[in-house]
Image (cartoon, rainbow, N blue to C red):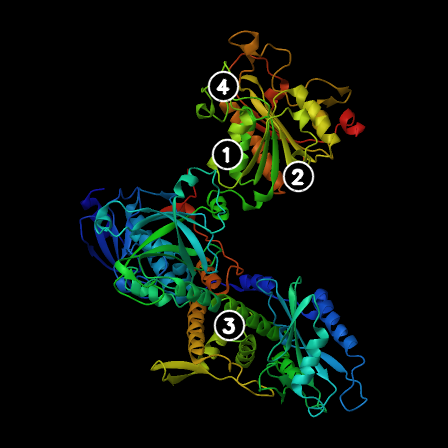
């Protein structure tokens, strides 16, 4: 078994996205939009009161958890939560979300009203901002959920900061926590390469993050490969059999609940066929990782890992004792 | 090697992975059972000059064919991709042992499912032997559904012709915006009968049919669904308007790991009109297919060792004689996008043994003028070169300027060039142009010339902000007519004439010019790729074909010499600027 840790470290350096506090550019972009929203709402009152409508912002998503990877096509995704000083009774969730949308809707951008957030896309910039809208509701935070023209518009309980802390609290040992974050990033690269570019049928990253966190009772300082094998095994084992009447076949299903409110299944959006495909891909991943671990040649192991993660994983040169080989390739040509 | 000798070598084999071996279908074919991730049964065919060539390997387990990378539909295992093998023929059994071990490694690697991506990457090669032929394509397949055009000719022989249903043979694939080089080769002639076909881009790569099966209409129908929702609605719109026919073409593509997509041109044939094969499945179709010969820029440049990165670079070449014409061809073949050629001379028969262009670019035909004295008008060197380059290479833009250099000095194509190359041969003109270019803020220039009679040649790349050609003529005590690079003593009788004063020429050959052109072309590419921006003088030294007196430098340097040029303190040109 060759030691591939150097290659994993190089790979990780290439793919990791810096946190906000190390990434001034993205931090500035985030603050610009938040300041703009604050300014646009400065004269806004909570309906029926003379209380000003205010909010505090929180970081969420992979920046907050420090598990982000560089986006493939330089479309950086900034996740922010805005928690308003309102109760669920003071505002209907759709009304507040619409207000945020309208205040941000300007000509240099497209502002979309999505089920979990308001998305601000810039025409000439390489990033977009997902703004989740929350009510503080007397320290009982709820998220404004639902599409603009859907009946399913409601406040429901959410614990975004608790989720970030739960992920961050993986270990008090900084080396172990760092290996956990590397593993999450590797799985995100695996997802990027193995599921098609439109993202159809790909498991959401938060699902992979939560499962890696749950699997992370194992730690091998010298080998990210071994740590990943443990995680892949854990994910594979968390599937269960389910009979699909439509296709008359046994398929693989998976249910993983959020560890905080609203405790819902993180894979709720995926169809059974997609989850079955997810299982197959995890199975193929595990086989590949184990094979790379067993492989005697670092060159061959790196070729397998490039097929898992893509060409950013370094290729180890083939070292052959050319002088004593019965035949060699010379590269000569005419 | 005789059968007996071969058998003797095979009997010597002793490797851990070998389970058994026995003679196969002929005296030179042996079957082996090998232990890897599973048991692999392979045959080796030694008929082709073993041990000077490696044997051909075939996988005997057909069930696995279509799931393993590096095994094609004919079951051939591709162990070594390269032609450039060096074999130690003195120990053939060791060669076989090593080859068998490599086969096991190849098949083991291929059987790890994640590596099936290597099979989908080589999908075209997997079916290559089944293709009816190749179709040329200027179309760049992306992930977008498109109506594209296919130039076709009627099939005029064989069983399809005898069926009398007017089937077609595909000739050339084009996009609908007609973005293809009509001046290149005889492309224009190939575009006669045009039909509209669809490009159907699969969303994800698919595996070939299992068990080494052929491409069938049924298999293809099963993969049509693998397209994005946007492409699906565009396809449906097309299908609604499409009437049943006896023949359909579809360009099928799917993503590969690298940029280039897999492509196959499918042809569906039936004796009666049938709905489009994407509309409904029918086992009545006869399915044929063609591999696609890519003609687009990115592919051709990479395939030919040229550099896509150079395609936005502009180079002006002043002087298109023996050296300049050769540089023009070399630079065009490196992938440079735009060349401006400047020369006032005509191409004459005197030139053809040392100019890049030969007799096919000469004109012997009188002009068809109404005047009483028709003339045989020679072709200009730059126009002939422009024609030759654009006919040879599809993606180089060449501008021909038939003028003396002094008249074009201020033109945009000189001032805005990334590099100006002066290959006029005359030292006096070189020094004059040096002053002129420096005065026009041209930053990078190359001056190149041959020494006479095969004694050598030079290419001088200059960053004119820091030094100039005149620096090579400036010594500690000031300017001299003697260039520091000279390999031949000055003031010898070097010129020759064969027909009197009007026919005076300097003796040098095509090989001399080519060597000088190589120096200049290399210096150009290093500069344009930002690999080396310094000012350098490069020289080559030859044995010479005369008895001319050589300089001390000639004796001192190796066959190739290069040094960095620094500004001469007393250089008048640099100091005047």
Where does label 4 land, which residue? Answer: B370
Looking at the rendered structure, whether the residues under marks 2 and 1 are on a common chain is answered as yes
- Look at the numbered discs 1 and 4 and tell me whether their residues touch, using CB distance below 8 Å: no
Residue B470 in sight here: yes
SS of the residue under disc 1: helix
- Residue at horizontal 20 percent and vertical 56 percent from the top: B22
Where does label 2 land, which residue? Answer: B533
Q: Residues within 10 Å of mark 4 (few under 14, many from 20)?
A: few
Q: Which mark identifies residue A166? A: none
Q: Position of residue A261 (x, y in %)?
A: 60, 88
Where does label 1 land, which residue? Answer: B389
Residue A263: which quarter of the image? bottom right
SS of the residue under disc 4: loop
Q: Position of residue B60 (x, y in %)?
A: 25, 59
Query: Which badge, 1 or 4, comes first in the chain's sequence?
Result: 4
Please state the chain letter of the residue tagged with numbered disc 1 in the rendered image.
B
Answer above or below: position of B567 versus A2. above
Q: Nearer the viewer, mark 4 or mark 2?
A: 4
**In the rendered view of the protein, which quadrant contains the C terminus of chain B?**
top right
Answer above or below: position of B469 versus A138. above
Q: Nearer the viewer, mark 1 or mark 4?
A: 4
Answer above or below: position of A185 versus B101. below
Q: State the separation of the CA atoms marked 1 and 4.
A: 33 Å
Q: Position of residue A36 (x, y in %)?
A: 76, 73
Residue B267: which quarter of the image? bottom left
Q: State the separation of the CA atoms marked 4 and 3.
A: 86 Å
Q: Nearer the viewer, mark 4 or mark 3?
A: 4
Report the residue that reaches farthest toward the front. B370
Where does label 3 land, which residue? Answer: A228
Q: Nearer the viewer, mark 3 or mark 1?
A: 1
């Amino acid at each position: 078994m060759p030691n591939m840790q150097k290659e994993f470290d190089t790979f990780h350096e290439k793919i990791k996205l810096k946190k906000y506090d190390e990434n001034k550019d993205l931090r500035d972009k985030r603050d610009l939009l938040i300041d703009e929203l604050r300014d646009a709402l400065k004269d806004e009152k909570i309906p029926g009161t003379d209380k000003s409508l205010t909010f505090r912002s929180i970081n969420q998503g992979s920046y907050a958890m420090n598990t982000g990877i560089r986006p493939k096509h330089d479309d950086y995704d900034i996740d922010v939560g805005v928690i308003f000083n309102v109760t669920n009774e003071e505002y209907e969730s759709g009304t507040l979300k619409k207000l945020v949308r309208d205040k941000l809707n300007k000509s240099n951008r497209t502002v979309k009203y999505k089920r979990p957030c308001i998305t601000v896309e810039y025409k000439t910039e390489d990033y977009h901002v997902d703004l989740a809208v929350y009510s503080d509701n007397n320290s009982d935070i709820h998220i404004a959920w639902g599409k603009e023209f859907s009946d399913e518009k409601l406040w429901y309980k959410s614990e975004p900061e608790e989720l970030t802390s739960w992920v961050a609290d993986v270990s008090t040992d900084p080396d172990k926590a760092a290996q956990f974050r590397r593993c999450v990033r590797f799985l995100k690269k695996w997802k990027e390469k193995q599921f098609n570019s439109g993202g159809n049928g790909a498991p959401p990253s938060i699902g992979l993050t939560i499962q890696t966190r749950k699997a992370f009772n194992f730690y091998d300082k010298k080998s990210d490969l071994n740590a990943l094998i443990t995680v892949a095994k854990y994910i594979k084992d968390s599937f269960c059999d389910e009979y699909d009447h439509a296709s008359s076949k046994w398929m693989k299903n998976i249910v993983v609940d959020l560890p905080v409110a609203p405790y819902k299944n993180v894979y709720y959006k995926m169809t059974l066929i997609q989850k079955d495909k997810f299982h197959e891909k995890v199975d193929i991943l595990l086989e590949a990782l184990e094979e790379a671990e067993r492989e005697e040649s670092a060159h061959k192991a790196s070729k397998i890992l490039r097929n898992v993660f893509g060409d950013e994983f370094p290729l180890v040169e083939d070292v052959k004792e050319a002088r004593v080989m019965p035949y060699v390739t010379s590269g000569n040509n005419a | 090697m005789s059968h007996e000798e071969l058998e003797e070598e095979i009997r010597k084999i002793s490797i851990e992975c070998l389970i058994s071996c026995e003679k196969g279908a002929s005296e030179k074919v042996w079957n082996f059972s090998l232990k890897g991730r599973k048991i692999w049964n392979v045959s080796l065919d030694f008929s082709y000059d073993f041990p000077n060539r490696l044997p051909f390997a075939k996988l005997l387990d057909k069930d696995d064919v279509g799931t393993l990378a590096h095994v094609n539909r004919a079951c051939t295992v591709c162990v070594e991709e390269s032609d450039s093998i060096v074999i130690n023929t003195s120990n053939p059994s060791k060669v076989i042992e090593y080859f068998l071990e490599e086969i096991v490694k190849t098949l083991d690697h291929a059987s790890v499912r994640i590596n099936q991506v290597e099979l989908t990457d080589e999908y075209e090669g997997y079916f290559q032997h089944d293709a009816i032929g190749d179709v040329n394509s200027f179309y760049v397949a992306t992930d977008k559904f498109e109506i594209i055009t296919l130039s076709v000719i009627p099939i005029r022989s064989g069983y399809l012709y005898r069926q009398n249903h007017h089937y077609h043979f595909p000739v050339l694939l084009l996009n609908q915006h007609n973005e293809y080089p009509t001046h290149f080769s005889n492309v224009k002639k190939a575009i006669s009968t045009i039909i509209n076909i669809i490009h159907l881009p699969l969303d994800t790569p698919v595996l070939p049919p299992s068990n080494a099966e052929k491409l069938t209409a049924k298999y293809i129908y099963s993969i049509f669904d693998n397209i994005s929702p946007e492409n699906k609605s565009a396809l449906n719109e097309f299908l609604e308007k499409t009437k049943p026919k006896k023949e359909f073409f579809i360009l099928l593509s799917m993503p590969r790991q690298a940029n280039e997509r897999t492509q196959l041109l499918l042809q569906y044939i039936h004796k009666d009109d049938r709905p489009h094969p994407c509309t409904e499945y029918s086992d009545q179709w006869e399915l044929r297919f063609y591999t696609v010969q890519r003609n687009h820029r990115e592919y051709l440049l990479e395939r030919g060792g040229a550099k896509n990165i150079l395609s936005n670079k502009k180079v002006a070449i002043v002087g298109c004689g023996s050296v300049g014409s050769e540089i023009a061809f070399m630079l065009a073949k490196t992938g440079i996008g735009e060349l401006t050629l400047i020369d006032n001379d005509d191409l004459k028969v005197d030139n053809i043994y040392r100019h890049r262009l030969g007799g096919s670019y000469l004109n012997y035909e009188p002009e068809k003028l109404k005047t009483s004295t028709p003339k045989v008008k020679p072709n200009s060197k730059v126009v002939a070169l422009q024609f030759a380059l654009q006919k040879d290479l599809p993606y180089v833009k060449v501008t021909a300027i038939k003028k003396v250099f002094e008249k074009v000095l201020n033109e945009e194509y000189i001032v805005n060039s990334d590099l100006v190359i002066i290959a006029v041969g005359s030292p006096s003109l070189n020094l004059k142009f040096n002053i002129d270019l420096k005065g026009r803020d041209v930053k990078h220039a190359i001056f190149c010339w041959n020494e006479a009679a095969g004694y050598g040649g030079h290419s001088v790349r200059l960053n004119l902000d820091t030094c100039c050609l005149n620096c090579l003529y400036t010594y500690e005590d000031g300017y001299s007519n003697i260039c520091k690079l000279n390999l031949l003593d000055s003031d010898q009788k070097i010129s020759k004439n064969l027909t009197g004063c009007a026919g005076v020429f300097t003796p040098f050959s095509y090989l001399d010019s080519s060597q000088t052109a190589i120096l200049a072309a290399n210096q150009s590419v290093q500069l344009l790729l930002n690999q080396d921006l310094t000012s350098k003088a490069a020289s080559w030294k030859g044995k010479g074909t005369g008895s001319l007196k050589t300089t001390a430098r000639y004796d001192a340097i190796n066959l190739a010499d290069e040094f960095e040029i620094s500004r001469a303190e007393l250089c008048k040109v640099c100091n005047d600027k």
